[in-house]
Structure formats: C-alpha cells, structure tokens
Amino acid sequence: MGPEVRRSGHGGINAFLTVSCAILCAGGAWAQGPSSVRPRLPEHVTPATVEAIDRGLAYLVGVQNRDGSWGNRMGLEAYPVAMTALSGFAFLMDGNTTTQGRYAPQVDRACRYILSSATSTGLIGREAVESRPMYGHGFSMLFLGELSGVVEDPRRQSEIQNVLRGAAQLASRSQSRLGGWLYSPDSRGDEGSVTITQLQGLRACRNSGVEVAKRTIDEAMDYLAVSQNSDGGIAYTASSPGPSRAPITAAAVACWLNAGLYDEPRMKRALAYAKRTILPSEPEQGHFYYAHLYMAQSVYVSNDPYWGDYFPRLRDRLLANQAPDGSWFGDGIGEVYGTAVALIILQLPYNCVPIMQR
C-alpha cells in the first residue's frame, strides 16, 4: 500500500479534489499536514531518497523551456516531445496536476506543449526535429492518459481526450502486419522498444476512457509472444528473431502486467530472465536507465518479493550517481532523460499513478 501522506515538501491538494486524488493517487493522500508532523515514508524510501527526488525535480524545473518543453541543452536530447512527456510524468508521480501541487505550473506548461505537438494525422510529434517520433507519441499517450483523470477544466479535459483519440487511432493505423511498431508512423516495420512504448501508451489511453481497438492490443500482445525466445527473453524484433535483449524483456513484462496478465506464463518466464540479467550492480553503460525504468516497474507492480532486495540496491546506486546540480546523465542521451527516468524509478513506492500501481 502507499503512504498515508506525501513527503513534507509537497504542496498539497485541496479537499475538493478528493475524487481526482482517489483516481491518481489511490495508494496515498496528497494533503500536506502541519509542518511539525513528520510524514510516514513508504517502505525503502529514506530521507536521503526524498532529498534526491526533490533535487531532481528542482533540476527539471530549472531547465524547462519557456514553451513548456524539455531537452537539447547540449545537442544530446533531440527529442523534445519524448523528453517533455517523460519529465511531465515524473512530476505526475510527485502528485502534481495542471492546477494542484507544488509543480502544477510545470505540468500545465508540459501539457500545453504536448497538446500543441498533436498533428492532424493523430501523431503527437514534431517530425522536423524528431527522427523517431513514435517514441514521443507513445510517451505522450502515457503522460496525457494518466493526467486526464485529474484535470479540472472541462475544456482542457476535452482537448486531452480529443488528442488521445487521434493518437490511439494513429497507433492502430500504423501497426505492422506482425503487430508491432517502428520509428515513424508510415514505416510499417517493427522492433521491441517502440512496440512497448505504444502498448503502454495505449493502456494509458484506455485508463482515461479513450476507446482502443481490441484487435490492436491483441496483435501487439501476440507480437510480444512471437518475440520471446526459449530462455524467456524478448528479441529485438519479431521479424528477424535474434538473441534476447534484457532491457526490452523488462519492458515487455511491464506491458503484460499493464494488461492485467499477472499469471501469464510468458510474463513469468520473461520476468525470471530479467531478474537474472538486469542487476543494480551492473556497469552504468548502454541502456542502464532504460532497462531499470521498466525493470523497476515490473518488479514493483508484480509485487515480487525480489523488490525488497532490488529496489534498495538500485536506489543507493542512483543516489550515489546524482550530480551536484540534482541531475542524472542517462544512457548517453542527456541529463533531462536520465533525471526523468531516475525520478520515475525512485517515486514508484509512493504508488501514486494508476498505470504503475500495485
């Protein structure tokens, strides 16, 4: 279960948001008590973890662009839609909405930027500056879908729903014959990481009440099944099977869990493979942040007893690697990406956002 109250630095949610709070933060309450009352932290969240989260969020506040986007300070993060969706999601996990919470202005600006990035085709992306816009499309569905339930303004809510409907339809139209997705809507190819991004985004659309074609989901889940090797891991692509990829395997587990398939044998085999191959002690190179973004979700949401060993080790690793300015540099992509991912991982125990709740 989640905490009784959020950490003491939180800005708090007004009482009239009781229903919305229950939707977005069913595991705990956001209302801040008197400053003299020390909040009860979730298991494995230490005071040092709280400080690291607060410093990371403050870093993102400081580097958000005036248009609401994040990214590209050093030419490394050329995916402003994807970076904005991930950063916005990190603020959702702190309990913020577009109008409530200590970082409501940042969420509001991020929401406006993502909505303004929606095109007439349904794609949420800026292809002029994004060479692989389907990543941003998937992460944007995830962000907007989870934000949708706590937006107070009916006009904003309607705008979000309209964008999500178009986004879900675009995803269905661009699905490959094998059930996956590739980097752009018209590519008609597929590979695991893009497919997983679309699947999780579409699940968030469903969470918000947007209709998603059952055939689209069924074919995508079949894609994961076809991509699974005998060792339980998931290959890079179903069209050209190869060795198992640990990061994609962890991401696939998260998708099975998002679909409610907690007893799916394929999911259990994939989780076992991920537990053997994705370790908090591994060198921080390659796809370390990506792998643990999904590994942490998978272990947490599945309520696997391994969480009690895994999360404290990963937590301590992340805290040790945080830069003095509060950022994390992730996977060679940049500080915004690394910081957003680290914050999502560290805030999982607050059990606050539906798609990542137990």
Image: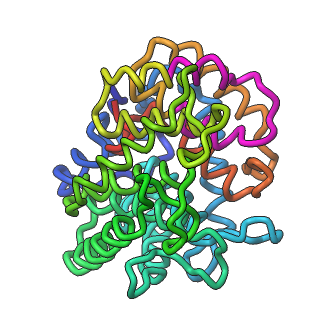
- Is 193 on the left-hand or right-hand side of 162? right
Q: In which quarter of the image is residue 205?
A: bottom left
Residue positioned 37% across, 72% down in the render: 170
Range covered by the magenta-colored residues: 271-296
- Is 239 on the left-hand or right-hand side of 301? right
- The residue most toward the bottom is 120
Q: Quadrant of the N terminus?
A: top left
| Residue 297 visible in the shown view | yes
Is 118 placed above or below 334 here? below
Residue positioned 59% across, 81% down in the render: 127
Is 35 placed above or below 273 here? below
Observer-nearest of 190 and 111: 190
Q: In which quarter of the image is the C terminus?
A: top left
Observer-nearest of 100 and 109: 109
> Looking at the magenta stretch, what is its main secondary structure?
helix
Is 95 placed above or below 148 here? above
Which percent across, then down, holds residue 258? 34, 39
**Residue 272 located within the stretch drawn in magenta:** yes
Residue positioned 66% across, 25% down in the render: 278
Observer-nearest of 88 and 29: 88
Q: In which quarter of the image is residue 108?
A: bottom left
Which percent across, then down, holds residue 100? 35, 61
Q: How has the structure been colored for display?
A: rainbow
Residue positioned 30% across, 34% down in the render: 27
**Residue 147 located within the stretch drawn in magenta:** no
Which percent across, then down, holds residue 294? 54, 38
| Residue 51 visible in the shown view | no
